[in-house]
Image (cartoon, coloured by chain):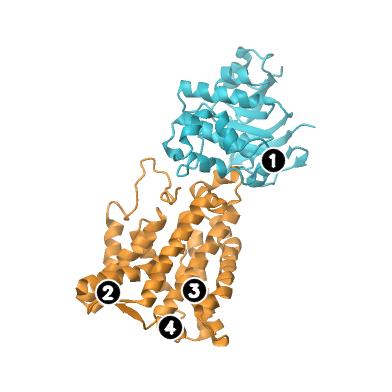
Chain colours: A cyan, B orange
Amino acid sequence: MSLLELANIELRHGLLEAVRSVSLTVEEGEVVALVGANGAGKTTLLRGIAGAHRPAAGTISFGGSEITRTPAYKRVAMGIALVPEGRRLFANMTVEENLIVAAQRSRAGRWSVDTVLEAFPMLQPLRRQRAATLSGGEQQATAIGRALMTNPRMLLLDELSLGLAPVAVEAVYASLRSVIGEGSTVLLVDQDITRASAIADRIVCMLEGRFVLEGRGSELTREQITEAYFGLRRGEVASA
Amino acid sequence: MTWVNDVIQGILLGGYYGIIACGLALMFGVMRIINLAHGDIAVLGAYLLYLLLEHWHTSPFIALLPVLPTMLLLGYFLQRLVLQRSLRGGLLTPLLATFGISIVIQNALEQGFGPNVDSLGGQVGSLVTSAWRINSEISISALSALIFGSAIVIYAALQLFLSRTTPGRQMRAAAEDPDTAELVGINSHAVYALATAIAVGIATLGGLALALRTTFSPYSGPDQLIFAFEAVVIGGLGSSLWGALLGGIVLGVAQTVGAQINPEYSILAGHIVFLVVLVSPRGGLLTLRSARGARRVMPTVTT
């Protein structure tokens, strides 16, 4: 049984169909990268899985139970955690408070304030600082730590590298590898195809709300992804 | 020396305004709801105490024991059943909803208790009459001191709650970013209901203070709302918790000093200070204009 199953999911922003009848399954322990241009519907899809955006049609199942209508805070307790685009930390709270506040509906597991600070040593001296005063990379680390605090079965990562200095991106991805190395299930969105394919088992390319290319990272060529990314071969749904 | 006394009396009066303003500031800070029924809720609390004391001859402070939990529950369900639904309709709908609740409470109280003024001042014995005489000009009444002390305790307790407890931290998170709060496992509807319950509970304490220090009628609510609102605005419009108490003190001092100039100027002086703060570029004593333009809610409430 797959951990996450999306069946014909449709997500709208008013009249705009951001995600059009998309189906996806993610197995336990799998790392899936979602790539695509701006406005392809990646963020909306992640928010739909996390419960922040109600689907107009389709069903979502997680761990065998249907969660299409389950509110976001209950999905957290079931084991879905989203690191949102732009970090979205609670700016007036300290790093430690940002972590603690996510522990309320935490599942049992190894992540606590101490283990998160161990995994991201750069946060250790900053634990009593207000989140607003952190650098972008430190904020991103805090945001990932906050998601880990819920001890998720599946981690959704949205645009980790957005707005970060290249050095900070390196640091964030380096600590992410140590997390993923421990067998977590991850669905990540990134605009950087090279980085995404380096980390993911499987790549899904989105264009205008649809999946246009899907395959194992090793099987897809860069050209194939680029074509799908920019919609160079319209109408042909490729599958590797 | 009379001026010194005026300022002292103004500060003490500010304690009362601070209590009345506290719940208003909390609801605005957490949910961006301006509760136009806030003053009427305080008066409703006063009437519940009055009703209880008609049948049960005891101290109003003991009567709080059943009344306060009742009002907390009322606040919880007010949020769950009315305000939460109205929040879906944008910013204007909750305003209209609380305006309607205000009218309902006023008319229900008039139906139940008649249009006369009442007071609980007679039920607390010497508390209302005793005072500490510092010198020939300055004396501090025991009741004003008690109300001011209660204000400090209420604000300190709320600060501790918001900074040290799990529901308090959740409240600050939901106030800052409700969408993200849900994504880290916070049920924002439950948090909002708790915030409203606390606001209504503190308003009840304000209602008791009102009933002890003066008289009240079913139509006393809007006046209390105006003073509370002025205190919140002078203090920086929900940008800081203690700002509302500070705003209440500024308002109280303005009123007592105004009254010293001419008794007719008392309320007017308060309104003038409010208007000056409202049109001033800084807009509130404790407002910190954020360069990011982000919503600033209770930044002082950090550990």
Q: Decide: few, some or many residues near mark 1? Use Cα within 10 Å; few <14, some 14-19, many ≥20.
A: few
Report the Cα–Cα distance between label 1 and label 2.
60 Å
Residue at (38% x, 60% y) in the render: B244
SS at badge 1: loop
Q: Is residue B267 visible?
A: yes
Q: Which residue is mark 4?
A: B121
Q: What amino acid is found at the position of numbered circle 1 in the picture?
A: Ala
Q: Is residue A18 visible?
A: no
The reply, left or right, for residue B203 in relation to residue B77 is left
Relative vertical location of residue A96 with respect to residue B228 in this rendering, above or below:
above
In-front residue for pair B180/B121: B121
Please identify the quarter of the rendering in which residue A132 is found: top left
Residue at (39% x, 57% y) in the render: B242
Disc assigned to residue B103: 3
Q: Which residue is mark 2?
A: B266
Disc assigned to residue A108: 1
In-front residue for pair A174/B267: A174
Disc assigned to residue B206: none
Residue A62 x/y as whole percent: 73, 38
Q: Are marks 2 and 4 on the same chain?
A: yes
Q: Decide: few, some or many residues near mark 3? Use Cα within 10 Å; few <14, some 14-19, many ≥20.
A: some
Relative vertical location of residue A82 with respect to residue B209 in this rendering, above or below:
above
Whether residues under marks 1 and 2 lie with C-beta atoms below 8 angstroms apart, the answer is no
In-front residue for pair A123/B259: A123
3 or 2: tag closer to the N-terminus:
3
Residue A213 x/y as whole percent: 67, 21
2 or 4: tag closer to the N-terminus:
4
Report the Cα–Cα distance between label 3 and label 2.
27 Å
SS at badge 2: helix
Relative vertical location of residue B248 with respect to residue A96 in this rendering, above or below:
below
